[in-house]
Image: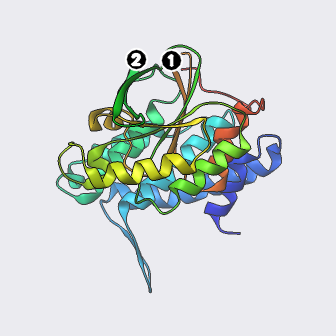
Amino acid sequence: MAIDQVIDEAEGSLFLPHFNDIAVQLCQTQTAATLPVLRGGKTLEGKDSTVSAATLFIDAVRCAALARSTGRSDNLNELASVAQQSSWAGTADLAVMQRALRREQMVGKRVPLESLDGHVMATVSLSPRVVSLTRGRRLVVPFKLWSPSASEILRILAQTGPQQIIYAITSWRANTGGADQPSSQVLDGLRSWQRSLPQHVLILIVPDAELDSFAADIFPAGILISDGKVLMNSPLSGKGEQRRLLNPLNGQTPHLLPSH
């Protein structure tokens, strides 16, 4: 089994400490090999393909998140020092690396926004909606229409979890790549999506700056917030990450929820 598959399984296997131990050991081995490459400002080149520095860094952050969630020490400080190296200045990898680091650094800390200030789709027009992030539990899923797996993952979260309201958030800019201004094409697509989703999934169009506050650049992502504290902020790229998001909602407690 490849290491990414092992991590994927371990992230959702809160009650299999031996399996988690194996995953963490594999992560430590991989990180020990990739950190020198990243410190050298390089990519990982093979015979048939090249792995970008951003991909290596995201994997290292994922390993750090797994270590933290299982009560072990992480190496986020080392990864932060890598991202600060002058060799990455001006590269396409830098912004991706910085956002991956920001997402994990905010876990266990105060939410970066007191509320989401956006618009929901009413019958005829858009209606303003403010969603507090400091009271109770909030499940927030940044997405964009063109993400191949976004609609499927939203349905899985809605069907598998309890009747927790899911705030599926997006911005005009995330969908058009241009100015953060309304688009009739995007609005039509969002209306079609809303009709196909369960009633407890609420699409909220927010300013692009609010997506950036959560370092959302890989879609869809899962953000779990409880009484103003971020418990998880991660791209939902694998089943393990989906389970890690759903476990607390279904009454399963991880080995350690970050408190620092």
Residue 41, position as x, y percentages in the image: 29, 59
Residue 122, position as x, y percentages in the image: 41, 34
Please give left or right for residue 64 compared with residue 120 in the image: right
Relative to residue 92, is residue 252 depicted above or below? above
Choose between 224 and 185: the one closer to the eye.
185
Q: Which image quarter is the C terminus in?
A: top right
Please state which amino acid type lies under the numbered disc 1.
Answer: Gly
Quarter-of-image position of residue 129: top left
Choose between 242 and 103: the one closer to the eye.
242
- Looking at the rendered structure, which numbered label has been put on residue 26? none
Residue 182, position as x, y percentages in the image: 24, 43
Disc 1 crowd rating (10 Å Cα; few below 14, some 14-19, many 20+) is many
Q: Which image quarter is the N terminus in?
A: bottom right
Residue 231, position as x, y percentages in the image: 57, 29
Residue 26 in view, yes or no: yes
Residue annotated with mark 2: 114
Q: Residue at x 32, y 52 (%)?
A: 186
Q: Residue at x 82, y 48 (%)?
A: 18
Q: Residue furthest front?
A: 124
Residue annotated with mark 1: 228
| Label 2–label 1 contact, CB within 8 A | yes
Please state which amino acid type lies under the numbered disc 2.
Answer: Glu
* Pointer 2 or 1: first along the chain: 2
Q: Secondary structure at mark 1?
A: loop
